[in-house]
Image: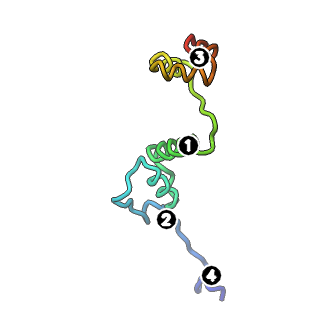
Amino acid sequence: MDGHGDTGFCHSATVPPDVLFSWPDDVEHGTPRGYRLHISNMQSPCQACRDAYNQKTHADRVRGKQPTLAVPKTFLARLLDNAPLDLLEEADQLWGSTVVDAIRDA
């Protein structure tokens, strides 16, 4: 005998992960922890959890390894236009007044 019983047939069934898993009360959707919980339970993460995970991953990259950050010129121009004088002078020292003026004219 091959261990499959008298008929020789092997039966199997696939059970969706949602049937085997219930979402714990202490974990919210829309969080990085919720994303990891989806993944660990073989579920496709919901959009809220995916968005939260992507935001955290990007923020971690900015805080750690990423030496530069891409910022739209128009947004940076608005920041410079509303910056106090001491910060505007610091921007001039960092980038030069020609660059600061070019950004503000954007």
Vertical position of residue 70 compared to residue 2: above or below: above
Say which element carries label 1. Answer: helix
Q: Depth-wise, is mark 3 or mark 4 nearer the camera?
A: 3
Q: Position of residue 8 (x, y in %)?
A: 62, 81
Vertical position of residue 87 compared to residue 44: above or below: above
Vertical position of residue 31 compared to residue 20: above or below: above
Q: Nearer the viewer, residue 12 or 100?
A: 100
- Quarter placement of the N terminus: bottom right
Point out the tag, 1 or 2, that comes first from the N-terminus.
2
Q: Position of residue 100 (x, y in %)?
A: 59, 16
The disc at residue 63 is 1
Report how far apart the C-alphas of labels 2 and 4 lie in the structure: 23 Å
Q: Depth-wise, is mark 2 or mark 4 nearer the camera?
A: 2
Residue sticking out furthest to the top: 105
Vertical position of residue 52 compared to residue 5: above or below: above
Report which residue position mark 4 lands on: 8
